[in-house]
Amino acid sequence: MKWSDLPGRHSLFWKLACLLVAFCLLMIWLSWSWGRYMEERNQFLSDEARGTLAGYAVGAEQAWRQGQRAGVDAWLQNMRQRESGYVGVIGGDLQSLSSQPLTDKEIERLTFLRGLDWPIHKKALPWLRVPFPGNPTAGNLVIELPQRFMPGRYQMVWRVITNGVIPGLFTLLLCVGLYRLLVVPLNSLREQANAWRADQLNVRLSSRTTNRSDELGDLGRAFDHMSERLQSTVALQQQLLRDLSHELRTPLSRLRVASESEAGLAALRERIGREVDGMQRLVEDTLQLAWLDTERSPLPEEAIQIQALWEMLTENACYESGWPGSQLQCTVESSCWVRGNLNTLAQALENILRNAIRHSPSGGVVRLGGRRDGDYWHLWLEDEGGGVAEGDLERIFSPFIRLDGSRPGDGGFGLGLSIARNAVKRQGGSLWAENTGHGLRLNIRLVAEVGGVSDDTIESRFAPTMSVCQPQIA
């Protein structure tokens, strides 16, 4: 496995890994530290028991020092009233320091004495040996452990808590963390999908989901982008249907008037042919604009030389407009090669060129220039048509926008620049407009290509395009 195959540092994998590793380490620490603590609580004497038994040893030592056997007898008599188990005081030679000697059974038990720090088992109440604090060799207190000091009285309860309740609580915390990490953003995605199903296309995910840096954040941002695309596509289609129905009313009305007029047959045919051609071009351009906006499959790309493409476009433009070639100038270097789809780019540039010719005076000049800008080529096409208002620089790319108020079909339906912008965007570029003082400049930004193909290849590829592309003047 290569390092490149590992997830990124913001991947959800690392969050889940850290959460699970932390949970495992926490459970290991719990079983070790808490287990040791409970073992001490269940097998060793508590601090209270040790203190009480050590205090008894101090009292036995004082009684021995003050009254020898008589003092020990008096102390033992007092202890039997306080403790119900065996209590004795023996010397270093394992002989009783009281006046009552040890029995054989007691002597036998002396061989199984335990210290205060020894573990205690629950088989029976053990006998403990507690040396005199002042002089351990002088004597020892021997006492049967009182029942109240016996450890492990709540052993079963603590086992249930240690092995069941506490791991269950930590597992519940792990489930809460996984729920917040995984299920909560998925619920948000489900709610957005349900909103789409209810035709609420304006619903967006919360910033808490889209600001995440892991895969779920990427998925949330993809959902929002898809929602925006879906909303804009539906809005565009609805707008196109409204505009298309509006634009078709005028030629249909003219057709009705022409059919009811007393004009000659030739004039009627010419009128009907012109109106049908206009409606056909309108429908085709509208469908193409809708296709460019909704189609997301990648277009076949190739190297395109802008200078050769311009020559092919201007040849047809001069033929159709009657302009001399000297008025269509190109200052782009022959080294200008871009990466894109030839047919789509040709139609976009053709629409822009015809729009410039239409809005320029008869003696005006249309210029194509460009410069290299990093990994892109920045091209611009300037006309001498006087430009447009600053507030309309973006509106001219909207469908069915005609700033000059021309009659529908008279030179265009306001779709040419919309088609051009969508065509350029599909190839990873951008198209925008600006005023130059004497006309309008349309800027095109396209991906640069290193190397290219020959001009003959461009001509052979573009020749079919010229036969199928309809002239479009926006």
Image (tube, rainbow, N blue to C red):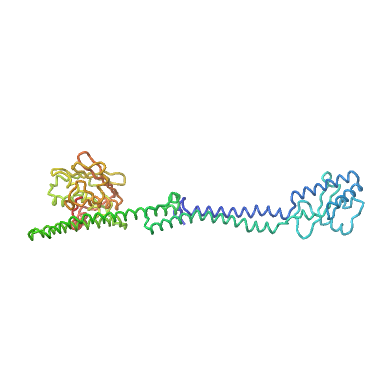
Name which residue lies at 64% across and 58% down: 163
x then y, percent, for residue 197 = 38, 59
Please indicate, yes or no, whether residue 399 appears anywhere in the rendered image.
yes
Q: Nearer the viewer, residue 368 or 459?
A: 368
Q: Nearer the viewer, residue 49 or 379?
A: 49
Q: Nearer the viewer, residue 38 or 242?
A: 242
Q: Please, which residue is most extreme toward the left here?
A: 264
x then y, percent, for residue 406 = 18, 49
x then y, percent, for residue 16 = 51, 54
Q: Can you tell which quarter of the image residue 192 is in?
A: bottom left
Left or right, residue 257 beside residue 440: left
Please indicate, yes or no, whether residue 226 appears anywhere in the rendered image.
no
Left or right, residue 410 beside residue 71: left
x then y, percent, for residue 18 = 53, 52
Left or right, residue 470 beside residue 1: left
Q: How many tags in the picture?
A: 0
